[in-house]
Image (cartoon, helix red, strand yellow):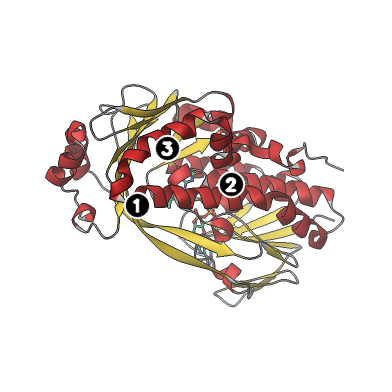
């Protein structure tokens, strides 16, 4: 008999898990609280680990032409001088997409695999014996329940773990600009000036993604529309970018982090930001989410029961997310809190992360992808 999964959340985690399970022969239903499947925010970096999972799912071929494959990643100081320059080849392969393009591809992939997607359906909790609870009072039985309902997951919080979400005092503004005026080459550049950062990257044939980051305490820096004179004084060579940004729709967020002692209980698995939400400093939140969905699928295919598969899954893959979360927090600290008297040390440290392979490998552990875990081996359909 077919096994059945109920999933809370129609984001990257919910849709990718659903698609993979359906391809393994499960019946799957996804509950999304919004009236439609949509992504807030602007662009998204999709790195090699995530690309490999999307390729395996058969989604990447359709997706790739809608994004940009980057050739290089650069760090630049306030005067435009290079602090770090990396060629993005092999395991460092990176694409950038508009977020909606990625979520549309996952939604279509899930539907093609036979997943039922129910919108305007809000989950409020779960029973570890295999039940998803909805706001409308329904209790849906399942062999597997997945909590993929984001950083403030109600399903996770209903399980009684020591878990929760915390805002960090860093603000990020994101913009999607309908032109390549600022990004004629396929290079992503992160510009640093004091404690402020600006990331500018192509994200489509005719599209540029910009993120602007600063400590929350710098209130004037966070005013919208962006203060062109203030930001141009910090980044003199980016004045044109600020002029364009001041005219463009923007979304503003706090960085945040999720602490979650367990990723599973009985027949319930917690996936994506609900389990390991992290600051986006390394561009790996979606990458980890896709890897963990892929690993969960492998653990289920290999185990005699769901209850046996879930602990195996957590024990085998969790270290990659934990390490990446720690490095992403360090990166945030390094840019937000680093003492002014030690600023002269930042360029050599940034350079060291490029040139010392052991350091780079540790910080970017997730880039190595599914080969880090035995659950990355091909899934047998036994
Ligand atoms: C500013 C920023 C920049 C980022 N940049 C990158 C990047 O460049 N590269 C990268 O890999 N990652 C990036 N990330 C991280 C990435 O966006 C997340 O890791 C990823 O979206 C996690 O997907 P998810 O499905 O777990 O959660 P979400 O994307 O939050 O999806 C959760 C879904 O569940 C729905 N939902 C919530 N509550 C309920 C409920 N009770 N019932 C039903 N549905 C519910 C929501 O509406 C949503 O659709 C970034 C994150 C941020 C905040």
Q: Which mark is residue 288?
A: 2
Q: Residue at x 63, y 72 (%)?
A: 161
Q: Is residue 96 above or below residue 259?
A: above
Dividing the picture into quadrants, the one containing residue 261 is: bottom right
Query: Which residue is the site of mark 1?
Result: 336
Number of residues whose C-alpha sits closer than 10 Å to that of mark 2, classed few (under 14), some (14–19) or many (20 or more)? many
In the foreground, 147 or 122? 147
Note whether residue 235 is visible. yes
In the foreground, 228 or 145? 228
Q: Residue furthest left?
A: 229
Q: Residues at badges 3 and 2 in contact (C-beta under 8 Å)? A: no
Disc 2 secondary structure class: helix
Query: Total marks drawn?
Result: 3
Number of residues whose C-alpha sits closer than 10 Å to that of mark 1, classed few (under 14), some (14–19) or many (20 or more)? some
Q: Which mark is residue 349?
A: 3
Q: Earlier in the sequence, mark 2 or mark 1?
A: 2
**Residue 70 pos. (x, y %):** 44, 26
Number of residues whose C-alpha sits closer than 10 Å to that of mark 3, classed few (under 14), some (14–19) or many (20 or more)? few
In the foreground, 237 or 268? 237
In-image side of 304 versus 41 (left or right): right
Disc 1 secondary structure class: helix
- Tell which tag, 3 or 1, sits nearer the viewer: 3
Does mark 2's beta carbon lie closer than 8 Å to ligand 1? yes
Q: Which mark is residue 75?
A: none
Q: Residue at x 75, y 44 (%)?
A: 375
The span from disc 2 to disc 1 (Cα, nearest Å) is 24 Å
**Residue 134 pos. (x, y %):** 58, 72
Does mark 1's beta carbon lie closer than 8 Å to ligand 1? no
Q: Quadrant of the N terminus?
A: bottom right
- Tell which tag, 2 or 1, sits nearer the viewer: 1
């Amino acid at each position: 008999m077919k096994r059945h999964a109920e999933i809370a959340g129609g984001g990257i985690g919910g849709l990718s898990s659903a698609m993979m399970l359906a391809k393994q022969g499960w019946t799957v239903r996804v509950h999304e609280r919004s009236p439609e499947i949509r992504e807030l925010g602007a662009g998204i970096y999709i790195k090699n680990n995530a690309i490999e999972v999307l390729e395996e799912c058969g989604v990447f071929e359709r997706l790739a032409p809608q994004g940009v494959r980057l050739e290089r990643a650069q760090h630049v100081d306030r005067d435009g001088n290079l602090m770090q320059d990396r060629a993005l080849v092999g395991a460092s392969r990176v694409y950038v997409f508009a977020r909606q393009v990625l979520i549309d591809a996952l939604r279509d992939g899930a539907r093609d695999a036979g997943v039922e997607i129910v919108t305007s359906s809000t989950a409020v909790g779960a029973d570890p014996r295999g039940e998803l609870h909805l706001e409308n009072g329904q209790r849906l039985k399942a062999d597997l329940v997945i909590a993929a309902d984001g950083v403030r997951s109600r399903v996770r919080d209903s399980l009684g773990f020591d878990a929760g979400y915390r805002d960090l005092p860093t603000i990020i503004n994101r913009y999607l600009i309908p032109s390549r005026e600022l990004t004629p080459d396929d290079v992503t550049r992160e510009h640093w000036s004091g404690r402020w950062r600006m990331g500018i990257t192509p994200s489509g044939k005719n599209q540029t993604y910009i993120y602007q980051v600063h400590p929350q305490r710098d209130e004037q820096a966070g005013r919208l529309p962006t203060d062109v004179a203030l930001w141009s004084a910090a980044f003199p060579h980016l004045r044109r970018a600020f002029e364009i940004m001041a005219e463009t729709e923007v979304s503003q967020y706090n960085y945040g982090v999720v602490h979650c002692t367990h990723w599973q209980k009985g027949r319930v698995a917690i996936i994506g930001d609900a389990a390991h939400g992290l600051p986006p400093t390394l561009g790996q939140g979606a990458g980890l989410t896709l890897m963990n969905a892929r690993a969960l699928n492998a653990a289920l295919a290999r185990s005699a029961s769901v209850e046996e598969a879930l602990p195996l899954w957590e024990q085998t893959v969790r270290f990659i997310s934990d390490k990446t979360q720690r490095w992403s927090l360090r990166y945030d600290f390094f840019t937000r809190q680093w003492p002014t008297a030690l600023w002269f040390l930042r360029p050599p440290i940034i350079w060291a992360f490029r040139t010392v392979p052991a350091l780079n490998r540790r910080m970017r552990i997730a880039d190595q992808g599914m080969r880090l875990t035995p659950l990355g081996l091909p899934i047998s359909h036994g």
